[in-house]
Amino acid sequence: MGFKSKLQEELESELNEKKLDLLPSGFQTVGKVIIIKLKSELLEKRKLIADTYLKLLPYIRSVYINRGKIEGEYRTPEQIEYLAGEKDPIVLHKEHGVKYKFDITKIMFSQGNLKERKHLASLVKNQEVIVDMFAGIGYFSLPMAVLSNPSRIFSIEFNPIAFRFLVENVKLNNVDKKVIPLHGDCKVEAPRLASQGIEADRIVMGVFPAPKGYIEEALKLTKKSGTIIHYEGIVDGEHELKLYNEFKNIAENSDIKTNLLDSRFIKSYGPNLYHCVNDIEISKN
Ligand SMILES: C[S@@+](CC[C@H](N)C(=O)[O-])C[C@H]1O[C@@H](n2cnc3c(N)ncnc32)[C@H](O)[C@@H]1O
């Protein structure tokens, strides 16, 4: 029996048929907490529904509801509200052997990026120098450091709350010898690293809608023998090459050659909108 059917069975005497039908079939699990989304018709019954989730999922300690989007330059979840169980928004989430500690009401954590977090780590070669320009709580820096063997990862993050968790997560995963958290704007920090003579084998540019305004700063870290950039963004179905082309134009103006190695679909982002990543190799002319 699927989870929705179990939920419907438990709530049969409390909700009418139409509302039973509108019950969600899924939820997001982060650590021992679940985050649910409910159709507006079910909101007045949210507490009852949350208590039913707790009853059906004995290993879950709390239920929160997501009533908003992820907004702003800090990529903060706007409305994650407590519903039932223990009222503690700090979770310890484990994925691919990596530990992420964060506050679910203040920090986003996308289930849709699960595969990409592991995939990026699998691309890292021995002793690479990596710059993670939009590091957050260590979404990519941590799996790259834990699952691969880079020499150093410079992880830049400007949101003070995310930065605090990044520092904590680096210690929690015992990668403090490899990951160097830098608190600041990557517009300033990336050129600062370049001025210290750092050349990157790999640069992660993972922020929405697309980090176009930061390409010039990333290019300053180009290594003579070549650098691979993971450039994320949102594209519509008809303009798959948009991300690569915008990157290429800016790179060519700085006399940097580009070569598209891979273009991956990460997740759907809306009607005909897709979160994609381009792996672009760059080298000096
Ligand atoms: C939320 S992450 C996205 C990670 C990944 N793409 C994902 O979806 O799992 C993006 C992070 O970049 C940070 N950020 C945005 N602009 C920045 C900047 N100019 N300098 C440093 N950090 C920045 C945000 O605060 C946020 O923590």
Image: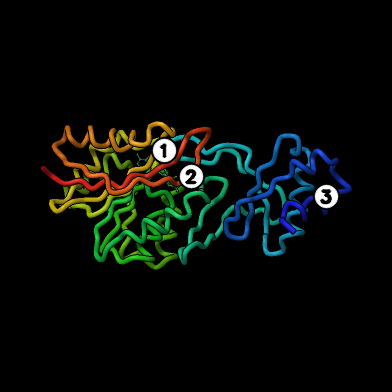
Amino acid identity at mark 3? Leu
Residue 132 position, x and y percent, is: 32, 50
Q: Say which quadrant the C terminus sits in.
A: top left
Task: Find out if the beta carbon at label 1 lies less than 8 Å from the nearest ligand 1 atom.
Answer: yes
Q: Earlier in the sequence, mark 3 or mark 1?
A: 3
Q: Distance between the residues labelled 3 and 1?
A: 39 Å
Q: Is residue 114 above or below residue 171?
A: above
Q: Where is residue 238, by image quadrant? A: top left
Question: Of the residues shown, which amino acid type is indicated by label 1?
Answer: Phe
**92 displayed left or right of 61:** left
- Residue that label 3 marks: 11
Instruction: Look at mark 1 in the image and give the residue it sits on.
Output: 208
Quadrant where the image shows the N terminus: bottom right
Q: Residue at x 44, y 46 (%)?
A: 266
Above/below status of 22 relative to 200:
above
Residue 121 location (% of width, % of height): 36, 60
- Seen at 75% across and 43% down, the residue is 46
Task: Name which residue lies at 67% across and 59% down.
Answer: 61
Element class at badge 3: helix
Residue on which disc 2 sits: 267
**Which numbered disc, 3 or 2, marks the residue closer to the eye?**
2
Of the numbered discs 2 and 1, the one sitting upstream in the chain is 1
